[in-house]
Image (cartoon, rainbow, N blue to C red):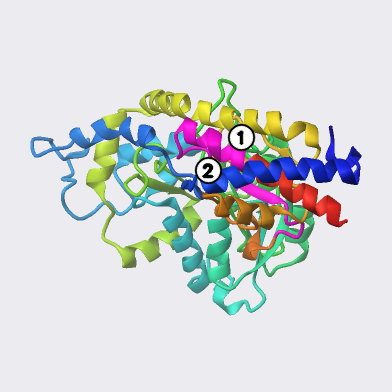
Amino acid sequence: MSYSNLSKSELTAELAVLSEQYKGYVEKGLSLDMSRGKPCAEQLDISLPMLDVLNSTTVCKSQAGVDLRNYGILDGIPECKELMAQFIQVKPSQVMIGGNSSLNMMFDTIACMMTTPIAEGCTPWFNVPDRKFLCPVPGYDRHFSVTGYFGFEMIPVPMTENGPDMDVVEELVASDASIKGIWCVPKYSNPQGITYSDETVRRFANLKPAAKDFRIMWDDAYCVHDISDESDNLLSLMAECEKAGNPDLPLIFCSTSKISFPGAGVAAMAASENNMKVLKNRYTNQTIGFDKLNMLRHLLFFKNFDGVKAHMQKHKEILRPRFETVISKFEEQLADCGIAQWTTPRGGYFVSINVYPGTAKAVEKMCKEAGLVLTSAGATYPNGYDPEDSNIRIAPSFPPVEELQVAMDIFCTCVRICAIEKLLAQ
């Protein structure tokens, strides 16, 4: 029964039962970490053969005969550009291959535009004292930390089931030239698992920014990360921007970090010719070239995009039971209480749950005291401030299913306790 329909005495009795359960968890001295969306050991194991495809007998040359052991090829092996272009639905000529981290490429991109105009006639962002960035919420904490580091005022934009509220985005972008960009995770968004609708993508492509140097930071981190047999489809932003006559709007990123090895994957960026000219000028002064042997290692292992898709099927088989565990625990223990709402994503790495307003930080604290570490409450909002104190990001990938079951029992108990305490206080 919904807690809102219970009397004070009934809530008090329920609280007593739950408090005893919680005490039992605390006494077990557990140590469970769900603070980040890290691949589990099983996922890392399926990529181990990649370490065997490159050795001292391997011919380390590109198809064009370039020696990949040496300096050069700033924007990456052409064959690798062709592969990564299929991830993010762009032309190979629009791709630059970086190091192991797409987050690093995003940071560098913002850093570049801080000191170098990305569009003719504009000033470097460093010279814009009231510079702003749009941040769909709930969203990815590391995106927010990048623009926070560079001194941007971050403006929250509410998410809908189709992506960011485009009425808000269009109005803000068109009316304020100090707004320089927006963060987006367009497929299986972090943390809600929402894929932007075709209409949303087209509205992004047809934006009319007051700032000529406004850019869409399109982090397609989960472009191939399905956990359901019914995968979501994402329209190509680059193609839509070209149709709309706005080819310079998007800056698109992805990596194999959660496909092969975190910290040893391959990152890629796609941009128009105008944007890439500016960005490559920075990279030319920053490096002579990235790790081409790692690019080759990935090419030899995956062979082609079909190989990537087959590999992701293995990831799906490992991840799906973990997501099912989280959702089933929520349905069993929270659905009838009327105190929480959550997403059921078809891909990505997270489940987003909104607990009873004003209790997210209390839930996180209780979980930690019982040995369960979660992503900090508020992390999915700029500067860690969730005005409702409600959203919590659940990362199911890392723990074994048996540990995850215990972790979700603890979590649901804490959610219920904190909600009852809030209701009684009201």
**Magenta stretch: includes residue 121:** no
Residue 235, disc = 1
- Pick whichever, 228 or 308, lies toward us: 228
> Residue 15: which quarter of the image?
top right
SS assignment at label 2: loop
Figure check: 261 above or below 181:
above
**In the rendering, at what x and y percent does residue 417 appear?**
72, 47
Image spot of residue 168 (x, y percent): 78, 54
Q: Earlier in the sequence, mark 1 or mark 2?
A: 2
Question: What number is the disc on residue 338?
Answer: none
Identity, as a three-letter code, of the amino acid under mark 2: Asp
Question: Which residue is more in the foreground, 142 or 327?
Answer: 327
Mark 1: which amino acid?
Leu
Q: Quadrant of the N terminus?
A: top right
Mark 2 — residue?
220
Neighbor class of circle 2 (other Cα within 10 Å; few <14, some 14-19, many 20+) is many
Magenta segment, which residues? Answer: 386-411
Distance of mark 1 from mark 2, alpha carbons?
12 Å
Q: Position of residue 363 (x, y in %)?
A: 66, 52
Q: Nearer the viewer, mark 1 or mark 2?
A: 2
Q: Quadrant of the C terminus?
A: bottom right
- Residue at left 36%, top 52%? 98
**Rendered residue at 89%/46% (across/down):** 8
